[in-house]
Amino acid sequence: MPSSEFVTRGAPVIQARNIMDLQGNLGGGSLYEFDLSQPSAPTPRALKTTAGAAFTFPGGTQYVGFRALTRTIAVADGIVVNGKGPGGALVYDRAKGVVVPVSIPNSDFGFLTTSSAAIFQ
């Protein structure tokens, strides 16, 4: 898929599709998680906002890297938008298929994590 990019560090596997940004960024891309229980033909699931609409990246989104925080929550912090960052984060509830942006005004923050192996034991 030419207008797509994988945006994860390990499991879960998340892909941005239908990217519209002409400058090589993620703007306009919708998120999909792949069900790897059938690795030869993984099924994509569209991720949504809390309002039920497809989650899409704003124009100028340059860097996003999701990683597992727990078995049911994945996070992406250090997001760069229009050359400014890191700033803000995304939290993904894997059970509900919902992505929520998180920010703290006038601050930079990150999520503390352990290795993925420790999370999934």
Image (spheres, rainbow, N blue to C red):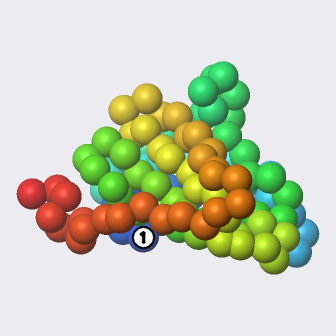
Point 56% across, 51% down: residue:
90
Under tag 1, what secondary structure?
A: loop
Residue 47 in the figure: left or right of residue 40? right
Q: Looking at the rendering, in which quadrant would you find the C terminus?
A: bottom left
Q: Where is residue 9 in the image (x, y as percent from the top left)?
A: 42, 70
Counting labels gives 1
- Vertical comparison of 2 with 101: above or below: below
69 or 32, which is in the foreground?
69
Residue 54 in the figure: left or right of residue 81? left
| Residue lying furthest top | 51
Q: Can residue 76 be seen in this view?
A: yes
Point 68% across, 35% down: residue:
54
The disc labelled 1 sits on which kind of residue? Arg
Q: Looking at the rendering, in which quadrant would you find the N terminus?
A: bottom right
Residue 83 in the figure: left or right of residue 120? right
Point 50% across, 47% down: residue:
91
Q: Position of residue 117 (x, y in %)?
A: 17, 67
Point 58% across, 40% down: residue:
100
Q: Can residue 4 be seen in this view?
A: no
36 or 47, which is in the foreground?
47
| Residue at image mark 1 | 9
| Residue lying furthest left | 121
93 or 17, which is in the foreground?
93
Q: Position of residue 101 (x, y in %)?
A: 62, 45
The picture quadrant where one finds residue 94 is top left
90 or 88, which is in the foreground?
88
